[in-house]
Image (cartoon, rainbow, N blue to C red):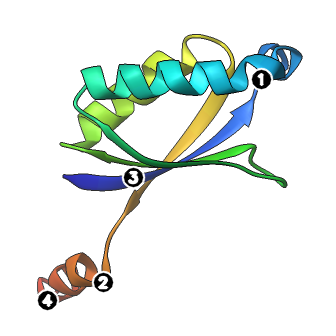
């Protein structure tokens, strides 16, 4: 499983319905599970992003499909980052010519 950090920003619609955010989070977790994605953590944040989510997905395509499905609901825009553990990054460095 690959690890992804998903940064989220509420849209106008999402902030207008902010009180539904905990309910939407439960729905997101269910949708993620159905897609084969494990939600490790969700944090509401202050600053440039409103949410930071850490997920594990089988591959980039699965993580991207989940992000698009969530964004299509209109409450949030996301930016997805691929994350590597120290061990994974070491293996990547070992492949350098």
Q: Which residue is mark 1?
A: 11
In which quadrant will I find the C terminus? bottom left
Question: Viewer-proximal residue, 21 or 77?
Answer: 21
Disc 2 to disc 1, how far (Cα)?
34 Å
| Mark 2 in CB contact with mark 1 (< 8 angstroms) | no
Q: Which mark is residue 63?
A: none
Identify the residue at horizontal 84%, vertical 55% (top origin): 47
Q: Nearer the viewer, mark 4 or mark 2?
A: 2
Disc 3 to disc 4, how far (Cα)?
22 Å
* Mark 1 residue crowding within 10 angstroms, few (<14) / some (14–19) / many (20+): some
Identify the residue at horizontal 56%, vertical 43% (top origin): 79
Q: Which residue is mark 4?
A: 94
Q: Which mark is residue 86?
A: 2
Of marks 2 and 1, which one's residue comes earlier in the chain? Answer: 1
Of marks 2 and 3, which one's residue comes earlier in the chain? Answer: 3
Disc 4 to disc 2, how far (Cα)?
12 Å
* Mark 4 residue crowding within 10 angstroms, few (<14) / some (14–19) / many (20+): few
Identify the residue at horizontal 76%, vertical 51% (top origin): 45
Q: Nearer the viewer, mark 4 or mark 1?
A: 1
Q: Is any part of residue 30 visible from this angle?
A: yes
Find numbered disc 3 in the image and state the secondary structure of the residue it sits on: strand
Q: State the count of labels.
A: 4
Find numbered disc 2 in the image and state the secondary structure of the residue it sits on: helix
Q: Position of residue 40 (x, y in %)?
A: 41, 50
Find numbered disc 4 in the image and state the secondary structure of the residue it sits on: helix
* Mark 3 residue crowding within 10 angstroms, few (<14) / some (14–19) / many (20+): many
Q: Which mark is residue 4?
A: 3
Of marks 1 and 3, which one's residue comes earlier in the chain? Answer: 3
């Amino acid at each position: 499983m690959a690890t992804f950090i998903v940064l989220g920003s509420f849209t106008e619609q999402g902030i207008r319905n902010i009180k539904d955010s905990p309910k939407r989070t439960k729905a997101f977790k269910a949708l993620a599970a159905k897609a084969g994605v494990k939600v490790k953590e969700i944090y509401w944040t202050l600053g440039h992003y409103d949410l930071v989510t850490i997920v594990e997905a089988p591959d980039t395509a699965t993580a991207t499909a989940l992000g698009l499905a969530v964004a299509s609901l209109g409450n949030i825009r996301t930016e997805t980052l691929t994350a590597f553990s120290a061990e994974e990054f070491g293996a990547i460095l070992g492949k350098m010519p």
